[in-house]
Image: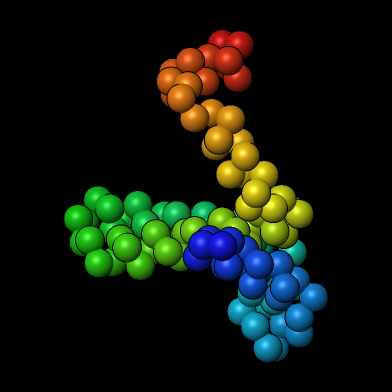
Amino acid sequence: MNVLDDLATTIAARKGADPDSSWTAKLFAKGPEKCAEKFGEEAIEAIIEAVKGDRAALTCEAADVIYHLLVMLAARDIPLSDVLNELARRQGTSGIAEKAARDPD
C-alpha cells in the first residue's frame, strides 16, 4: 500500500466514528454536500498559493486538497480504486482525444 491507499483506508474507517473524536467523522456527519464544499474551499486555497508562487504553502494546500477529495469521494461511496482505475483507463490517451470521446460538442 502507499500513502494514498493508507489515507483512503483511514478516511473510510472514520465514516461511522463519533464526530467529536475525528475531523473526518465531523465532515461525514455534515453530509456529502459539506464535504464537497470543503473540497472546493481547499482547492481555491491551493489555487491562491499557486498564483502567489509559494512552494511550501502550495505543497501544504495540495495535501489538504487530496485529503478533502478523498473525503468527498468517500462521502459518495466512491473508492479511490475507482478513480485510479479511471486514470489507468485513460493512460496513454491524449487529453484532447479523451475529452473529445466524452464531449459530443
Q: Residue furthest front?
A: 1
Location of residue 97 in the rendering, given as x and y in whole percent from the top left corner: 48, 15
User: Who's the residue at 76% across and 54% down the image?
Assistant: 77
- Residue farthest toward the top in the current orientation of the protein: 105
Q: Position of residue 75 (x, y in %)?
A: 72, 59
Left/right placement of residue 48 relative to residue 74 reads left
Q: Quadrant of the N terminus?
A: bottom right
Q: Residue furthest right?
A: 16
In front here: 18 or 2? 2
Relative side of 43 to 20, left or right: left
Camera-side residue of 85 and 71: 85
Residue that lies at the very extreme toward the left in this rendered image: 53
Rendered image quadrant of residue 88: top right
Where residue 62 appears, x then y in whole percent?
A: 39, 59
Q: Is residue 75 above or below residue 90?
A: below
Query: Residue 82: where, in percent of width, then height?
Result: 67, 44
Number of marks in picture: 0
Residue 96 horizontal side relative to residue 16, left or right: left
Please name the residue shown 19% across and 55% down the image. 53
Q: Can you see residue 80?
A: yes
- On screen, residue 100 above or below 29: above
Q: Which scheme is used to colour this image of the protein?
A: rainbow
| Residue drawn where x is 76% and y is 80% of the image | 17
Q: Of residues 23 and 2, which is closer to you in this image?
A: 2
Point out the image quarter for the C terminus. top right
Q: Is residue 33 visible?
A: no
